[in-house]
Amino acid sequence: MRHLIKSNLLAFALLLLLSGYALAATPSIPQGVSLEVSGTSITVKWTANTDSTEGYKISYGTSSTSLTTSKEVTGKNTTSYKFENLEPLTTYYFAVAAYIGSETSSNSTTVNATTGTGPSKPPTPENFKIQSLDSITDTSITLTWKEDTESDLLFYRVYYGTSAGHYSSKAETEGANLSAFEVGGLESGKRYFFALTSVNTDRQESDKTSEIAADTTPDTLAPPAPEITFAGIAGTESITIKIKHPVPGLADIKGTKILYGTNPGVYDSVPIDIGTGTSTTITGLTQNVTYYFVATAYDYYNNESGYSAEKKVVIEKSKTLLSDDSSFSGCFVSSSDARKDAVAALGIMAAILFIAADFFKKYRAVIMVAVIAGILAPVSPAAAIDGNNTIALKWGYFKPSESLYEDVYDNSSSPVTILYERKICDNILADIEAGYMWKSGYAVTVSGEETGVKTELTLIPVSIGAQYEYEVMPFVSIFGGLGGELWYVNEDPSDDYFKSNDGTVSGWFVKGGLKLFTQSEMFEGAGLILESKYSAVSRFGDNDTDLGGVMLNAGLFYRF
């Protein structure tokens, strides 16, 4: 019996010993975890364990459920670790565990913090260039720039190499209170490319400047050939050429020459020297002839590049909307008569404007409220609207029938129209309206290519018609009408080759739409008009060109 008790006591003591070892081998979960943010850095802090902890494992990430990155720090009494260069304005989540050998505790409570914007980059240096051609020697090139006035600027860093965009070497200035730097140790007769940055006290570096380049002496290197970026018709007998240099910052480029001819690969013209300019217009050319253009660049040491890629331009016959007289045979009258017709059209428009202005002066308060009500107030059944007169102001979208109109002036206009209606009998109204449209565009070649010849088009349509209006429900009416139109037209090209055309042309129209009256008795008669209209303005089919098209209008009206 005593032997059995002794055995049990020994087993119990052994169990306590093993349990104590196990407890000692599993570290406690760290407590008091907190975070401190400074710019794009976050410092994790915790309370040191009192057990046999050997170190700590910090797990973190940008999601509380995915702490995918970890960092181990050794030392039982270590209580913080700083994470630097984190993403700015980003929320990070952290948890801390302790470890003894291979045993690791569970994670602490997860905490989070959001980084700040971090230190800012200094501004990119300005006016970076080669100091002068005299500052270039066989082994050195002096650079200059505008000195930065930032108080925290530390120094400038110069990047350079013998290949554009690739810098195999760099040099740093001593301090930031300077605006020039000599790069030495270069090879003679080589082309070097440079870029400059500034660095502040936070060791933040600015973006690089635009690249510049120079050739050490003796300079026998030809500049690279320029690129012709545009070659197109500028007028009926002229072509505009635009160029750019592949190394725009090459210090010793003196100018560019343009050569051309009428056969590919043969440029027998006198070279046109445009200096350091980037474009020129060549005049006195012949229509219906194909011209071929190339460009070369030359430097101050009489080195000249090879030819650029060749550009071909055909000076085709060009046209505007009204430049073809046959399109308007019998349409436009003499200049004197055209002015009379224009004055008559403008007079009608002015009369309508005068009536509208006088009415607005008397009832402007009512009209202003009606404008708002006409847009915002819902349509609701109510008593019928009485009144014999209606005035309206409409804005629209005009889609022309003539494809040449679209080629020269794009595909739409935004006319403004004023309208006066007079009720003749129960459902019949007579109306007169006048509008205004203006567009600018460019003459096109017969093959549809845009030229550089600017042209302006003014249209003043005046119409008289009749319409049938039917009240489909209280405060909602539909209408349809037709009538005749007289349009004053003026086209004014900038090139003297095209003559200006002005005059009048007649036509007809059909239209339809609806009127929505407001429900308020206080603003009775005000409402919204929606209308579609088709015009054929080609002297009733006698002209090749139709100035009309489809017009969609929306506006405000007042019936009284």
Image: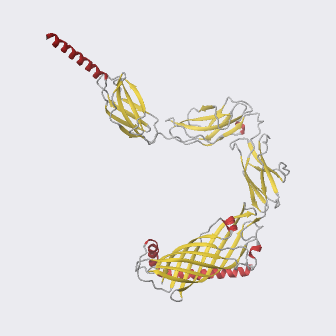
Q: Position of residue 354 (x, y in %)?
A: 56, 82
Query: In the shown orientation, is residue 416 left or right of residue 318?
Result: left
- Between residues 8 and 402, which one lies in front from this camera angle? 8
In the image, residue 251 lies at what x, y percent?
Answer: 70, 41
Residue at horizontal 68 percent and vertical 42 percent from the top = 249
Quadrant in which residue 385 is drawn: bottom left
As drawn, is 508 to the left or to the right of 469? right
Vertical side of 419 occupied by 126: above or below: above
Q: Position of residue 376 (x, y in %)?
A: 44, 71
Quadrant in the picture for residue 245: top right
> Farthest top residue?
3
Q: Name the residue nearer the viewer: 461 or 182.
A: 461
Q: How is the image coloured?
A: secondary structure
Please determine whether, in this image, residue 310 is positioned above or below residue 501: above
Picture residue at 65% right of the left edge, 32% below the top: 183
- Residue at coordinates 34% horizontally, 35% vertically from top-left? 34
Q: Within the image, what quadrant is residue 215 found in?
A: top right
Q: Looking at the rendering, in which quadrant would you find the N terminus?
A: top left
Instruction: Indicate the position of residue 114 as horizontal and vertical percent values.
Output: 40, 41
Near-viewer residue (149 or 317): 317
For residue 281, above or below residue 510: above
- Total marks in image: 0
Tell me if residue 105 can be seen: yes
In the picture as drawn, the residue positioned furthest to the left comes out as: 1
- Direction bottom: furthest residue: 425
In this rendering, position of residue 317 left or right of residue 519: right
In the displayed structure, does residue 337 sit left or right of residue 423? Answer: right
Residue 130 appears in the rendering: no
